[in-house]
Image: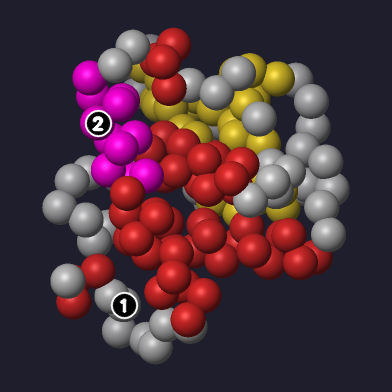
Amino acid sequence: MSFLLPKRKLSISEIALIPEACFYLFIFRLKISFQPSVKWMPKATTEVSENTGPENLKSAQLITGVIDGLGNRTPWKNTCLVKALTAHRMLKNRKINYKMHIGVAPVSNNQLKAHAWLSVGNNIILGGGNLSAYFEISGFK
């Protein structure tokens, strides 16, 4: 179990989120692998994520920080979609307003690369990075 823990000291809040995050990372990895997307994909929306208070933003960042930290420490592969769906479920359970985005970017040989990320208000809280290369094709709440 020590492989799940980072080298820095975790707060009690982070430690409390680890079992739930591991559970949902595992569940969504299985669902993506064995079920059609109709069963596990949230409903599409064109709405912008509502602005949320600083307390909810801090909670959302704590949750996504734990998910990101566990992402490379589990024995199964956690793609950006698995992490985004895990965060989606955990934020929804806590009634925190968010939006999950799916986008594509062109790569060589007329192929596309897909990416999923989450935002709370105007803040990207999961899957950030070079998002300017991606064209958002759908949003989910």
Q: Residue at x 54, y 40 (%)?
A: 88
Question: Between disc 2 and disc 1, whose residue precedes?
Answer: 1
Instruction: Give the residue type at disc 1.
Output: Pro
Residue 74 horizontal/vertical position (percent): 21, 56
Among the 4 quarters of the image, the one containing residue 48: top right
Is 109 left or right of 83, judged from the image as shown? Answer: left
Is 77 left or right of 137, judged from the image as shown? Answer: left
Q: For numbered disc 2, what is the local secondary structure?
A: helix
Location of the N terminus by quadrant is bottom left
Q: Which residue, given by chain and number where applicable, does mark 2 sit on?
A: 30
Q: Can residue 42 be seen here? A: yes
Task: Count neighbours of disc 1 (C-alpha within 10 A) and say few if under 14, some if 14 to 19, many if 20 or more.
Answer: few
Which residue is farthest bottom?
9
Asked if the stretch drawn in magenta spans residue 30, the answer is yes
Q: Residue at x 40, y 55 (%)?
A: 20
Asked if the stretch drawn in magenta spans residue 118, the answer is no
Q: Residue at x 59, y 45 (%)?
A: 93
Q: Can residue 84 be seen here? A: no
The span picked out in magenta is 24-34
Residue 99 horizontal/vertical position (percent): 67, 36
Residue 126 horizontal/vertical position (percent): 54, 51
From the viewer's side, name the closer residue of 46 and 1: 1
Among the 4 quarters of the image, the one containing residue 71: bottom left
Most prominent secondary structure in the magenta stretch?
Answer: helix
Instruction: Give the residue type at disc 2.
Output: Leu
Q: Which residue, given by chain and number where applicable, does mark 1 sit on?
A: 6
Q: CA distance from mark 2 to mark 1?
A: 25 Å
Task: Count neighbours of disc 2 (C-alpha within 10 A) and say few if under 14, some if 14 to 19, many if 20 or more.
Answer: few
Q: Is residue 140 above or below residue 9?
A: above
Q: Residue at x 30, y 37 (%)?
A: 27
